[in-house]
Amino acid sequence: MKKEIVLTGDRPTGKLHIGHYVGSLKNRVLMQNEGKYEMFIFMADMQALTDHAKDPKLIRTSVTDVALDYLACGIDPTKSTIFIQSQIPELSDLTMYYMNLVTLARLERNPTVKTEIKQKDFGMSIPVGFLNYPISQASDITAFKAKYVPVGEDQLPMLEQAREIVHSFNRTYNTDVLVEPEAILPPKEAGRLPGIDGNAKMSKSLDNAIYLADDYATLKKKVMSMYTDPEHIRIEDPGHVEGNMVFHYLDVFGKDKVKIQEMKDHYMAGGLGDVKVKKYLLEVLEEELGPIRERRIEFAKDIGEVHRMLKVGSEKARAVAAQTLDECKTAMGINYFKN
Ligand code: TRP
């Protein structure tokens, strides 16, 4: 039986943090190991350049970092195809053809792009490439004929745009080459992991993230500085567990739910200090992150090998994208030198 195709990726603009891990990496590894899917996982470096054109060095370094993060988490290049977007020029070809099927007004309406434009302070100077990235993302997805795209909630507008392009292309050129993709959202309980400072979002720019690459001392320092309950001053004081990051993280990462409930009850009644809870969280996190860190260190010993793996993955991905592009050009009647 032919396996269902799954495609997903990340913008490489830094190392991946534990928010990425619970929100997507963990799920990708599970899907990969189920063996039911043909998985393509990639670094969207061209997309990253749409708002980092002046900083290609950061993107380049991040491609290696993200590859190490993937490998450390258990994404396995013998099971999944890991590749780099910029090494597949066919994706840009597809984008050129898709651009003719989308209006400027439609791009400007994209809620995720709108939010990003506000955050990034582009003002009147929005790069064309940035506004266009939903179309480029549709190329990423459709080039591999992906049926499923595991993404966060914020990516739903991109999937909507990709489906519109699929419809429009197939209708316009009277074909069925392109496959309509569907988003797979992370499990509800994974949600979005807040930052260690209590901010709703864990991110590099907010400087509130725990990275998969953090060493034990850094992890410890970050856990010990986590936002708890500002009103819980003395140990005897009753504390709040809602909005308390230490308990929030215990809910996400802890396996011993009975013990966690007991600690919550004790904390709320008073008599349980923050340091004790933080020490337990550190233990829980280290149990999960320690082995990932060790694997990351191992893979980092041979970066040449990591790059070879990316080259092999990119070549394999390129062959698939080239086949789709060929079919698209045939459907459009512009495969001039083929009959
Ligand atoms: N837009 C995604 C992000 O910001 C990255 C991405 C680019 C992507 N192309 C994709 C994700 C295709 C899934 C499928 O994280």
Image (cartoon, rainbow, N blue to C red):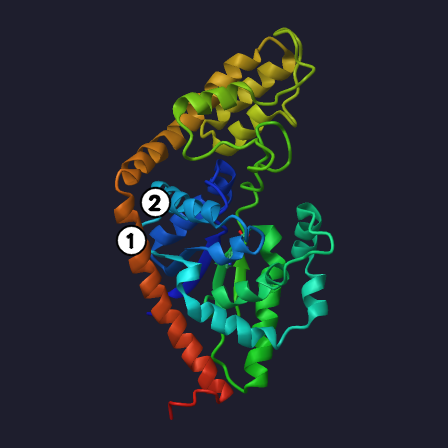
Mark 1 against mark 2, which lies toward the viewer? 1
Identify the image quadrant of the C terminus.
Answer: bottom left
- 29 or 1, which is in the foreground? 29
Q: Residue furthest bottom?
A: 339
| Mark carried by residue 18 | none
Task: Say how many tags the image has.
Answer: 2
| Mark carried by residue 309 | 1
Tell me what residue is drawn at x 55 percent, y 41 percent: 189
Residue 297 in which image quadrant: top left
How packed mark 1 is, by other alpha carbons closer than 10 Å (few <14, some 14-19, many 20 or more), is some
**In-image side of 297 versus 85 (left or right):** left
The location of residue 308, given as percent across then percent down, is 27, 53
Does the image show residue 144? no
Tell me what residue is drawn at x 43 percent, y 68 percent: 89
Residue 232 in which image quadrant: top right
The location of residue 17, given as percent across then percent down, is 48, 37
Tell me what residue is drawn at x 57 percent, y 22 percent: 226
Q: Which residue is mark 2?
A: 71
Would you place residue 303 above or below residue 147 in this image? Answer: above
Q: In the structure shown, which secondary structural element does the residue marked by tag 1 occupy?
A: helix
Kind of residue at disc 2: Leu
Tell me what residue is drawn at x 50 percent, y 46 percent: 13
The location of residue 315, given as percent across then percent down, is 32, 64
In primary-sequence order, the first of circles 1 and 2 is 2
| Mark 1 vs 2: CB contact within 8 A | yes
- 72 or 306, which is in the foreground? 306
Kind of residue at disc 1: Met
Asked if ligand 1 lies within 8 A of label 2, the reply is: no
